[in-house]
Image (cartoon, rainbow, N blue to C red):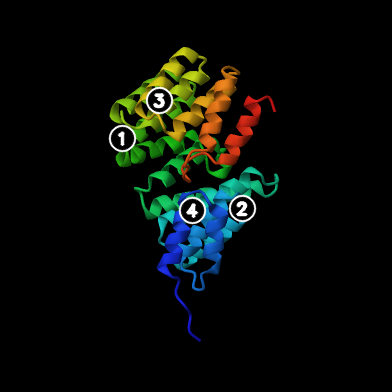
């Protein structure tokens, strides 16, 4: 029996659909491929994850890991899938899923210590999870030096998150501003500061930071969304927030952006729905 290999053109088409956030269309292409490699299973898992099918995504990443157990990215995505399942799981099953999440993140980092996204997710897990699940602020703190080695600005952002958690708000602000100094062209660094200032009730300063982000990247979907989100949280400029969200929904988004569905839910809030 001859097993047909996946056509590179079909796989490329699925990647293009995924990058255009057409996840269901990507899945249709991927599910037709006769000989599924680890790469194919991983892209299936990513598309399922983005569609909110977290259990199926975990099953797909399990298959990818089985074929390529040394791949850090596949382990990281497996952990993310477990984590999303844990968020909506019952009190009986959530702890086990949380532990699987941590173990997958830790394995991803062990396989590739420079995997920035895996490092960041493991850091956040340690920050948020209780000790009996393997979390803790001390464990998070131990990761900061490693994060800083891969990205100095991100190391300062991680330090800011930890300081914020410990309610050392002055230090948190200093670290966020240091991250901006190190990466002045990264609009996300300015957005981090704007969100922090907004949480502290410093609305005027937050608006100034957002104006700086807007000047740096006027067409950035990230800036558009965050402006709308903060307006709605602060219960002001709701008409402008609605217009921003409509612009966001009609923008060419990528998997790195907030899903359109979430923006549509926020739009309902802006319109009083």
Q: Which residue occupies 57% across, 51% down?
A: 82
Tell me the mark number nearer the camera, choosing from 2 and 3.
3
Q: Are marks 2 and 4 in contact (CB under 8 Å)?
A: no
Pointer 2 or 4: first along the chain? 4
Residue 63 percent location from the top left of the image: 52, 65
Pointer 1 or 2: first along the chain? 2
Tell me the mark number nearer the camera, choosing from 2 and 4.
4
Q: CA distance from mark 1 to mark 2?
A: 34 Å
- From this viewpoint, is residue 232 visible? yes
Q: CA distance from mark 2 to mark 4?
A: 15 Å
Q: Is residue 109 left or right of residue 34?
A: left
Q: Report crowding for label 2: few under 14, some 14 to 19, many 20 or more residues within 10 A (C-alpha).
A: some
Where 160 sits versus 36, above or below?
Answer: above
Q: Secondary structure at mark 1?
A: helix
> Disc 3 designates what residue?
214
> Disc 2 designates what residue?
53
Quadrant into which the C terminus falls: top right
Tell me the mark number nearer the camera, choosing from 1 and 2.
2
Q: Are marks 1 and 2 in contact (CB under 8 Å)?
A: no
- From this viewpoint, is residue 229 visible? no
> Disc 1 designates what residue?
152
Residue 217, image quadrant: top left
Pointer 2 or 3: first along the chain? 2
Q: Which residue occupies 52% across, 63% down?
A: 29
Q: CA distance from mark 1 to mark 4?
A: 30 Å
> Disc 4 designates what residue?
18
Residue 118 percent location from the top left of the image: 43, 47
């Amino acid at each position: 029996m001859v097993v047909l290999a996946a056509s590179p053109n079909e796989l490329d088409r699925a990647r293009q659909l995924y990058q255009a956030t057409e996840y269901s269309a990507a899945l249709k292409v991927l599910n037709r491929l006769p000989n599924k490699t680890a790469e194919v299973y991983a892209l299936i898992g990513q598309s399922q994850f983005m569609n909110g099918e977290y259990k199926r995504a975990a099953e797909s990443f399990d298959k990818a890991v089985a074929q390529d157990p040394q791949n850090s990215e596949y382990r990281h995505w497996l952990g993310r899938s477990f984590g999303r399942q844990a968020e909506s799981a019952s009190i009986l099953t959530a702890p086990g899923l949380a532990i699987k999440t941590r173990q997958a993140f830790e394995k991803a980092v062990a396989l590739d210590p420079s995997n920035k996204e895996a490092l960041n997710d493991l850091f956040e897990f340690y920050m948020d999870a209780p000790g009996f699940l393997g979390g803790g602020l001390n464990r998070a703190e131990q990761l900061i030096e490693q994060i800083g080695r891969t990205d100095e600005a991100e190391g300062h952002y991680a330090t800011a998150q930890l300081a914020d958690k410990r309610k050392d708000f002055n230090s948190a602000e200093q670290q966020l501003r240091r991250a901006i100094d190190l990466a002045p062209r990264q609009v996300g660094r300015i957005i981090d500061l704007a969100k922090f200032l907004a949480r502290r009730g410093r609305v005027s300063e937050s608006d100034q930071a957002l104006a700086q982000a807007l000047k740096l990247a006027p067409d950035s979907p990230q800036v558009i969304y965050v402006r709308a989100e903060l307006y709605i949280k602060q219960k002001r400029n709701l008409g402008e927030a609605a217009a921003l969200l409509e612009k966001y929904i009609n923008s060419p988004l990528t998997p790195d952006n907030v899903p359109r569905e979430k923006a549509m839910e926020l739009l309902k809030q802006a319109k009083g729905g």
